[in-house]
Image (tube, rainbow, N blue to C red):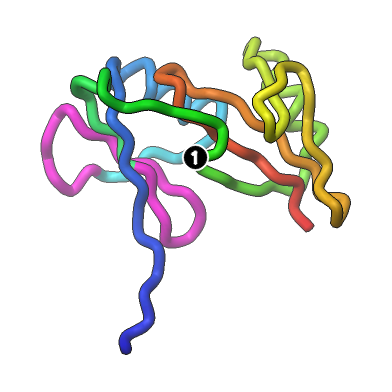
Amino acid sequence: MPKLTFDHYTIKVKDLETSAAFYKNVLGLDEIENRTGKPYIRWFSIGKSTELHIVEGDNRGIHTNVGVHLAMKLDDFDGFISHLKSKNILTHDSKARPGSITTRADGVRQVYFQDPDGYWIEVNEAD
């Protein structure tokens, strides 16, 4: 069987500009060329070969919870927490308790927060 690799994750958003600004300014993602040419879609790079696609449209039927999330990792966890605070982003632990972080059994810290449409994002301390 051929080996699969992860390509992209797509989310539906209410306001394309608001969401694009969030992913650029809060997560620091680089916007890349939207090869569809459709004006209601924006693409962002997540690492070397993975992308996030945001599509403007009706997302009323989408239900979110902390157990379904996009997860990333970084080296400067404390710096990132400070960055989130400077952007007035409310952080949560893995049980969605506000103002908390999770420390896994292996000592890796995790924080969860939501984008403007309520999608959950997890950021891990690189191990």
Left or right of 50? Residue 113 is right
Height in image: 120 above or below 103?
A: above
Q: What residue is shown with label 1?
A: 68
Q: Quadrant of residue 81?
A: top right
Q: Give percent across and percent down for residue 59.
A: 26, 23
Left/right of residue 22 with respect to residue 80 in the rendered view:
left
Asked if residue 86 is positioned above or below residue 107 in the image, the reply reads: above
**Extreme-top residue of the structure:** 88
Which is nearer the eye, 97 or 34? 97
- Residue at image location 76% in from the left, 17% down from the top: 99
The reply, left or right, for residue 77 in relation to residue 115 is right
Q: Is residue 41 magenta?
A: yes
Residue drawn at x 26%, y 45% is: 33
User: In the visual, does 125 lie left or right of 26?
Assistant: right
Magenta stretch contains residue 102: no
Q: Amino acid at mark 1?
A: Val
The secondary element bearing badge 1 is classed as loop
Q: In the rendered image, which quarter contains the N terminus? A: bottom left
Q: Which residues are magenta?
A: 34-52
Q: Identify which residue is drawn at 38% across, 26% down.
A: 63
Quadrant of the rendered structure where residue 89 is? top right
* Residue nearest the observer in this picture, 8 or 119: 119
Whole-percent x, y for residue 32 in the image:
33, 44
Residue 92 sits above or below residue 31 on the image: above
* Residue 91 placement (x, y as % from top left): 69, 22
From the top left corner, tell me how far across and down residue 116 is, in percent.
44, 17
Of all residues, the one furthest to the bottom in this rendering is: 1
Look at 22% across and 25% down and name the residue there: 56
Quarter that holds the C terminus = bottom right
Judge by depth and name the residue closer to the eye, 119 or 24: 119
Mark 1: give few (<14), some (14-19) or many (20+) Cα within 10 Å.
few
